Image: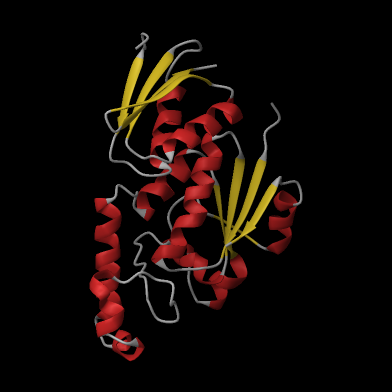
Amino acid sequence: MADFNQELDASGLNCPLPILRAKKTLNGMEAGEILHVIATDPGSVKDFDAFSKQTGNELMESKEDGGKFHFMIKKN
Amino acid sequence: MDEKKLAIIATKGSLDWAYPPFILASTASALGYETQIFFTFYGLQLLKKKLELQVTPLGNPGMPMPMGMDKWFPILGMTLPGMQGMMTKMMKQKMKDKGVASVEELRELCQEAEVKLIACQMTVDLFDMDSSQFIDGVEYAGAAAFFEFAGESDICLYI
């Protein structure tokens, strides 16, 4: 997995909390920095894709590993 | 990117119906929408400092019942004292188990994200409520004020 600047573990949280927490964390980051989000909500896969498209924060990576979903988001 | 706008009218005051306005408003804010919720009639319950929201299976055949309770307790059984309180307790526990946010938490997230919460002044008066019962930051206005924002909104929902 690529390098990241901050990590957010949203495991066990359900919609819309992973997105809201991610947004909050991104607010405190600099442009170009990368946030690694870990989630267990299967709905988060489509949600982070949609979040990226609508906010312009690039979703660099989205994958499942051992029942957890990992997202790499670059702050714009 | 031009800021999009979401206008919501929240008219219901039960635990289950408290979720759609707060989930959609907080998410919309995270996506960059400017958001307002106009609370009217029973929706005003969602603005109370101390939320005492309940769910009821009465008049709601779509509500999934735990442990086959719908077979053991036909509709009349649901009118028994304490039944609504029990159903509410079970629903809250289930939400906690599944990692669903509480209404209080979602409401706080909405306020943090500067979602504008507006209480319908007419229904506040109608129900003899007053602003001391409501959380801080609530604004009071009428239908015309709602249209000023809703008329320019990209999405407008009646919940």
Left or right of residue B116, residue A33 in this image: left
At x 31%, y 72%, the residue is B65
Q: Nearer the viewer, residue B47 or B139?
A: B47
In the image, is residue B100 above or below residue B126? above
In the image, is residue A43 above or below residue B66? above
Q: Position of residue B16 (x, y in %)?
A: 42, 64
Q: Nearer the viewer, residue B37 or A26?
A: A26
Left or right of residue A59, residue A18 in this image: left
At x 51%, y 68%, the residue is B12
Quarter placement of the N terminus of chain B: top right
Residue A37 at least partly seen? yes
Q: Position of residue B77 (x, y in %)?
A: 29, 88
Q: Position of residue B42 (x, y in %)?
A: 50, 71
Q: Nearer the viewer, residue B1 or A56?
A: A56
Q: Position of residue A22 (x, y in %)?
A: 41, 29
At x 71%, y 30%, the residue is B2
Image quadrant in which you'd find residue A55: top right
At x 32%, y 20%, the residue is A7
Count of number-bearing discs: 0
Residue B133 at least partly seen? no
In the image, is residue B102 above or below residue A33? below
